[in-house]
Image (cartoon, rainbow, N blue to C red):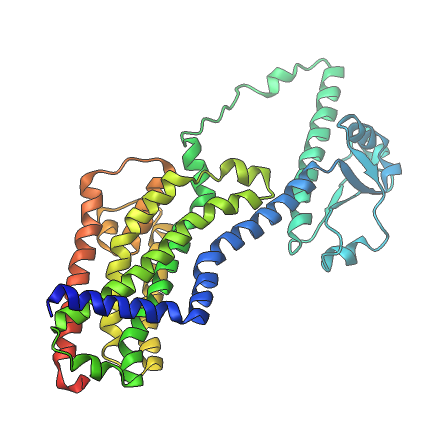
Amino acid sequence: MSTTRAAWAVYVKEVVDALRDRRTLMVVLFSSVLMGPLLLVALSALLASFEAGAESRVVYVDGAEHAPGLVNFLQRQTRIVKAPPADYEAKLRVRKWSDPVLVVPDGFEAAVLRGDVPAIEVVSDSGNAQAQAGATRAQRLLAAYAQERTTLTLALRGVAIEALEPFEVHERDLASARTRAAQITGMLPFFVIMAVLYGALNAALDTTAGERERGSLEPLLMNPARRSAIVLGKWGAVASVAVLIATLSCFSFIPAQWWLRSDTLQAMFQYGWPEAVAFLALLVPFAAAMSALLMAIAIRCKSFKEAQASSTVVLAAVSLLPLVSVFDQRGESPWHLWLPALAQSTLMARVLKGESMGAADLAAPLVVCVVLTSGCLLWVARRLNDAAVR
């Protein structure tokens, strides 16, 4: 039997075995493919609730009768002034109330007219995210009211308002629309990288340590096929499963956008078919390398559980490497492209930002993946030749 035919036979056998384990496949599909879109939809629901709070025109004022000028200002800002419930503080603490409350002290208006500096409390709870966001909007309203009172007071005394503002400040944002959108879509590379890893994990462990534990590896090694053919067939099957999971993960974020409830997130989430295809192209060599690496780790183990414990090191490293770009605020460094997972995360971030990539940028991670894949497959073939495997 030729090496190609033997490798193909092993490949078909391993793919069939992997697809036959439907329970494991469903767990992998949910944990690696659906988790990202589900979290995205949950995030959009959270942002939609904040947007609904921002659009609310109701302002709750405790002691509104003490500040008729403030009430008049809020009404001119198309706000509806209402009294809060008596137990609003207790409800804020237990998150049963999601709006801040303005507390106006007795004699507020008279104190302002005398030139005193009375205080208005903005009551919220930092543990209540919606109330805290509303507190910021309430403080802006109070600042606008204070500025209006100051302007009127100075105008009555003949002081020009322009004298208080010797210059103007204009903000200019250099970031493009895609770069700003990448602040939201920046989480996608992490999800698709972990999907590749978990997609290859079970298949790599089952085709090596799992078969060894079940006793089905020895009969396979008794065949006259070369060890290289067996290794290539097994690796091809594991890599195919990893690429399949990667494909589903990359394209799953496209229909997930249909269920986004936040208008802001929908406007900023710029991820379509071109980005998904670019992600997949970057992930195919990575999937091949991770499949070979996990097989090299698992082939040393005598049981499936032992292989799972050993592979946790790879899982931890791959999940932590992309965080280098988060903690290193100096930007990209050339060595980022020479580390698996970090290189793919860096290049996918460029795709989301719409930045160009040169041939050297693509060659570095490709060379690393090819070298890692070759070295790990040679190691697996050598272990199969070892008498200890039998």
Q: Residue at x 35, y 69 (%)?
A: 18
Horizontal side of residue 348 vs 178, given as left or right: left
Residue closest to the eye, 108 or 80: 80
Residue closest to the eye, 38 or 248: 248
**Quarter of the image holding residue 29?**
bottom left
Residue lying farthest to the right in this orientation: 65
Residue 9 x, y percent position in the rendering: 22, 68
Horizontal side of residue 268 vs 321, given as left or right: right
Q: Quadrant of the N terminus?
A: bottom left
Residue 386 x, y percent position in the rendering: 13, 82
Asked whether the viewer can see residue 330, the reply is no
102 shown above or below 290:
above
Q: Residue at x 46, y 67 (%)?
A: 27
Asked whether the viewer can see residue 29, the reply is yes
Q: Residue at x 67, y 48 (%)?
A: 130
309 shown above or below 96:
below
Residue 333 x, y percent position in the rendering: 25, 46
Q: Quadrant of the C terminus?
A: bottom left
310 shown above or below 337:
below
Q: Residue at x 18, y 73 (%)?
A: 380
Residue closest to the eye, 378 or 85: 378
Residue closest to the eye, 149 or 195: 195
182 shown above or below 90:
above
Horizontal side of residue 192 vs 390, given as left or right: right
Residue 381 x, y percent position in the rendering: 14, 73
| Badge count | 0
Horizontal side of residue 376 vs 134, given as left or right: left
